Image (spheres, helix red, strand yellow):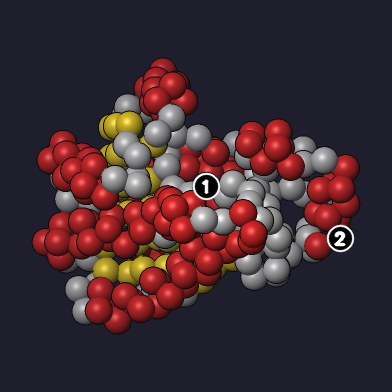
């Protein structure tokens, strides 16, 4: 598998320096890559995650590398009050947020016939509802700042008619509706909102659970590019959309999937 490019060979976005950024689900996988990318740009970063050990390890690694230590708290996003409380606490520490990245998700597998109303509600409570209430929390601060950028993480899985996660597909397909449905309202305050939809990203979890011989064949069959997607690849698109370089980008979906969909 290819390595992520060295950070000193990639773009620097001066507009992100010292901006406050909030990331949901930032302790591991794609979220950790996003947190790392913003920290390396000199942003003031806050994130939440349920994984305490992974989150603390990430924060310490970044501090040990000479960067500003990100603010983080353990938070279960199914608890909306806790989510909004964490955002308020982080804003008190770092200032109003210029950037929100709605990354948190869980793509646990399930079948149509196995889903109960309780399980359905729990999947929505992780994969759909937190994005809306995080946006609700950060918008007043962005209005005070005079601008902002919201990046919602979608998925190409449902667009490629992926199977094994109907509740996840429902939740992720709604992300584009959230983005487009709020774009005009938020745009009046120069708050941009976009979707980034990853393909099959080789996180540690994905490799451990699902990258078998058949998965390798699926990648070869569906991707246009031969290399495997890395969390870093998603983070770079998020950086661009958060920066002033993307000042006139809103209401759009940006796919990072090596040409799968």
User: Can you say whether 174 is above or below 133 in the image?
Assistant: below
Position in image of residue 155 (x %, y %): 57, 61
Q: Nearer the viewer, residue 101 or 119?
A: 119
Residue at 70%, 68% in the rendered image: 161
Front of the two marks 2 and 1: 1
Disc 1 element: loop
Residue at 30%, 81% in the rendered image: 184
Query: Within 10 angstroms of label 2, few (less than 14), some, or many (20 or more) residues?
Result: few
- Give yes or no for contact between labels 2 and 1 (Cβ–Cβ under 8 Å): no
Q: Nearer the viewer, residue 27 or 241?
A: 27
Residue at 40%, 25% in the rendered image: 52
Q: Which residue is mark 1?
A: 106
Q: Nearer the viewer, residue 163 or 203?
A: 163
Q: Which residue is mark 2?
A: 221
Q: Is residue 67 left or right of residue 109?
A: left
User: Can you say whether 90 is above or below 51 in the image?
Assistant: below
* Measured Cα–Cα span from mark 2 to mark 1: 25 Å
Q: Is residue 164 visible?
A: yes
């Amino acid at each position: 598998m290819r390595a992520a490019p060295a950070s000193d060979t990639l773009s620097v976005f001066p507009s992100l320096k010292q901006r406050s950024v909030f990331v949901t689900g930032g302790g591991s996988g794609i979220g950790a890559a996003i947190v790392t990318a913003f920290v390396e740009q000199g942003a003031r970063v806050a994130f939440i995650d349920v994984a305490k050990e992974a989150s603390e390890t990430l924060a310490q690694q970044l501090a040990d590398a000479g960067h500003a230590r990100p603010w983080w708290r353990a938070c279960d996003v199914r608890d909306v009050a806790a989510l909004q409380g964490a955002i308020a606490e982080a804003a008190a520490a770092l200032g109003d947020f210029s950037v929100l990245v709605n990354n948190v998700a869980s793509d646990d597998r399930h079948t149509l016939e196995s889903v109960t109303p309780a399980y359905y509600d729990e999947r929505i409570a992780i994969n759909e509802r937190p994005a809306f209430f995080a946006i609700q929390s950060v918008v007043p601060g962005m209005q005070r700042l005079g601008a902002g950028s919201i990046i919602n993480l979608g998925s190409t899985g449902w667009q490629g008619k992926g199977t094994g996660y109907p509740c996840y597909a429902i939740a992720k397909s709604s992300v584009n509706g959230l983005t487009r449905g709020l774009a005009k309202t938020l745009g009046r305050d120069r708050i941009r909102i976009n979707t980034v939809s990853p393909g099959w990203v080789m996180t540690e979890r994905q490799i451990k659970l699902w990258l078998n011989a058949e998965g390798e064949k699926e990648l070869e069959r569906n991707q246009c590019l031969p290399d495997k997607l890395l969390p870093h690849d998603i983070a770079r698109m998020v950086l661009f959309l958060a920066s002033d370089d993307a000042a006139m980008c809103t209401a759009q979906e940006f796919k990072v999937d090596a040409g799968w969909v």
